Amino acid sequence: MSGPAEILIVDDEPNVRLVFRTTLETAGYAVREAEDGQAALDELARSAADLVLLDLRMPGMDGMETLRNLRDAGVQVPVVIVTAHGNIPHAVEALKLGAIDFLTKPLSPDSLRKTVVEVLHRHAEGKSEPPPQSRPIEPVTVASQFASNLVQAKRALNHRWFDEAEVYLKQAIALDGNSAEAHNLMGVLHELRNEHDASYREYKAALKADRHFEPAKHNMTRYYERFTFGRSKVPIDLGEQA
């Protein structure tokens, strides 16, 4: 990536945009702003961005409609959904559109920077790798390969490459069958495909691996509520900022 990464902040609240801009500019990023969904579409039509921080609730065109319009237009920029509401009513749809990263207001500067760093790193992988002769030689371990598989799976989910995500998650589970995070992500993948029995089995496997793993507990609660009451206010939980 040449020059600082460009981040577009889309939020109808000027104070929120100011806080986000200050946090990210002091970290070395180039920041642009849009006050609503249409302004964001216009801004991205003029110039691409490396990442979009997209508020969910805005007057006029809300975050979900903005995200749908971006994908319909073929714009595959990584998107982080930002919302002041703990429940994301269209979480499954947002995930299907490639937004697997969520931030809930109010959020600390550290959590914002951490998510931005992780998402940009995930999408930069493979874009500008140095030639083989200049790469440092590092030993490949089970742990490093497992971590790489999870990163690649999340990147594939961002791009809605569900078959590819499944390959990486299967490889991760083969390396560490007791990983609650890997089984939970596999459950999310099955849920995105409407394979609900399979998602239940993976959430159950995640809890078997770690009965205290909160994301799997949340997802299992949502599963039971949806099939008992026909709906649930519990959002999909991908674990630590995915």
Image: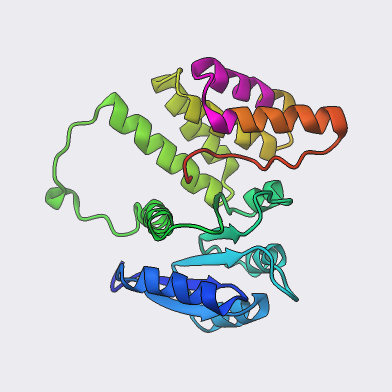
Q: Is residue 140 left or right of residue 22?
A: left
Q: Is residue 216 left or right of residue 117?
A: right
Q: Residue at x 67, y 27 (%)?
A: 220
Q: Residue furthest right?
A: 229
Q: Nearer the viewer, residue 49 or 104?
A: 104
Query: How far from the left and from the top, in percent, is residue 82?
Result: 58, 60
Residue 168 among those drawn in magenta: no
Q: Is residue 38 visible?
A: yes
Residue 204 among those drawn in magenta: yes
Q: Is residue 195 visible?
A: no
Q: Is residue 197 left or right of residue 74?
A: right
Quarter of the figure that contains the N terminus: bottom left
Q: Residue at x 31, y 71 (%)?
A: 26
Q: Residue at x 40, y 61 (%)?
A: 109
Q: Is 192 placed above or below 31 here?
A: above
Boundaries of the magenta span = 199-216
Where residue 146 sits, quadrant-wise, is: top left
Number of numbered discs overlaid on the protein picture: 0
Q: Is 104 placed above or below 136 here?
A: below
Query: How far from the left and from the top, in percent, is residue 97?
Result: 64, 54
Q: Residue furthest top?
A: 208
Main secondary structure of the magenta stretch? helix
Q: Is 231 placed above or below 175 here?
A: below
Q: Nearer the viewer, residue 13 or 118?
A: 13
Q: Is 61 placed above or below 193 here?
A: below
Query: How far from the left and from the top, in percent, is residue 99?
Result: 58, 54
Q: Is residue 10 left or right of residue 145?
A: right
Where residue 55 sits, quadrant-wise, is: bottom right
Instruction: State the scheme by which the image is colored.
Output: rainbow
Q: Residue at x 66, y 63 (%)?
A: 56
